[in-house]
Image (spheres, grey):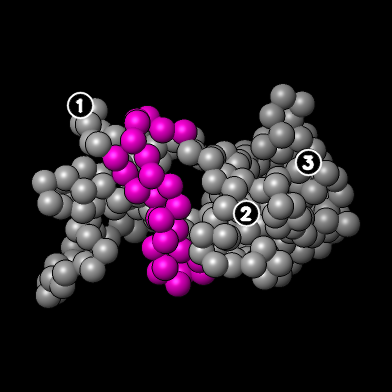
Amino acid sequence: MKKIKILGFIVILMMYSISCEELPDPAGERGVAVVPGIINLNPGVFDVNDLQNAYVQFTVILPAGVTVPNATLIGSYNNNHADVTIKELSTFPAVVNITSVDAAQKLGIALADIERGDVFDFELLITTDGRTTRSTPLVIPVACVYTTAMSTGSFHSVSEDWNSEGDITITADPGDPYKLYVTGLEEMEGLVEDLGPLVMYVDPVTYAVNVPRKAIASDAWGLHNIAYEGSGTFSTCDGIYTMSFEISVDEGSWGANGFIFTKN
């Protein structure tokens, strides 16, 4: 049986004051004048397995009541700060579709040289009253698209922190492929998961994984309602979940524990 560690909670409030010399931004001022926004990104990656047909799409919006004559979408590759013009926009809101072929051509990159893990950065520039402002960079990775074939099925779970290893099963909700159900995390330790399954939510754009607190077994070695809560990431190319779970019971908590789920 694992020894429970009941954690106390200490709240420390700290304030930092940092001063620094302000230097001019060669690309334009940030945080002043009109700052455009990017919403509704889908898909959020260039599919490494189909770069000839890959694309990303999003909507550009302006603050309420603001009008501008145009905006320039610029792009860079692997943080080379090329800031090459990709598109000119003149109406807002604007639905923008960028293909990997077009982005590569304008940045002078051969499609065959683009690899998994590479990143494209896109920003919007707007000039008003002599001031140029830019949006927060939109980072588009070159990765695999999300599929239930890769995100679900039989997985091997390993946790050195929790001292556990065994197989688990992940299934998708019939109505939402990004809502996943996990069974077996405590069954491998001889417990009955009468309160499960554990529910995980995958962000459809970033593939970050969020796990709200959920009790999965009412009895855990004489303790009550063992529950998991945490977050992590899902690698769409190889089907690996890298997770951190806070594991707790009614009597206290074991704190954060790292887990790796590898597709069998």
Determine the CA span between mark 2 and mark 1.
35 Å
Q: Nearer the viewer, mark 3 or mark 1?
A: 1
Q: Earlier in the sequence, mark 3 or mark 2?
A: 2
What residue span does the magenta drawing correspond to? 70-95
Q: Earlier in the sequence, mark 2 or mark 1?
A: 1
The numbered mark at residue 101 is 2
The numbered mark at residue 65 is 1
Q: Nearer the viewer, mark 3 or mark 2?
A: 2
Determine the CA span between mark 3 and mark 1.
42 Å
Write down the residue under mark 3.
148
Q: SS class of the residue under badge 2?
A: helix
Nearest the viewer among 237 and 78 is 78
Determine the CA span between mark 3 and mark 2.
27 Å
- Residue 263 in view here: yes
- Quadrant in which residue 195 is drawn: top right
Neighbours of disc 1 within 10 Å: few (<14), some (14-19), many (20+): few
Q: SS class of the residue under badge 1?
A: loop
Residue at (67% x, 35% y) in the render: 179
CB of mark 3 within 8 Å of CB of mark 2? no
Q: Nearer the viewer, mark 2 or mark 1?
A: 2
Say which amino acid is labelled 1. Answer: Gly
216 lies above or below 8: above
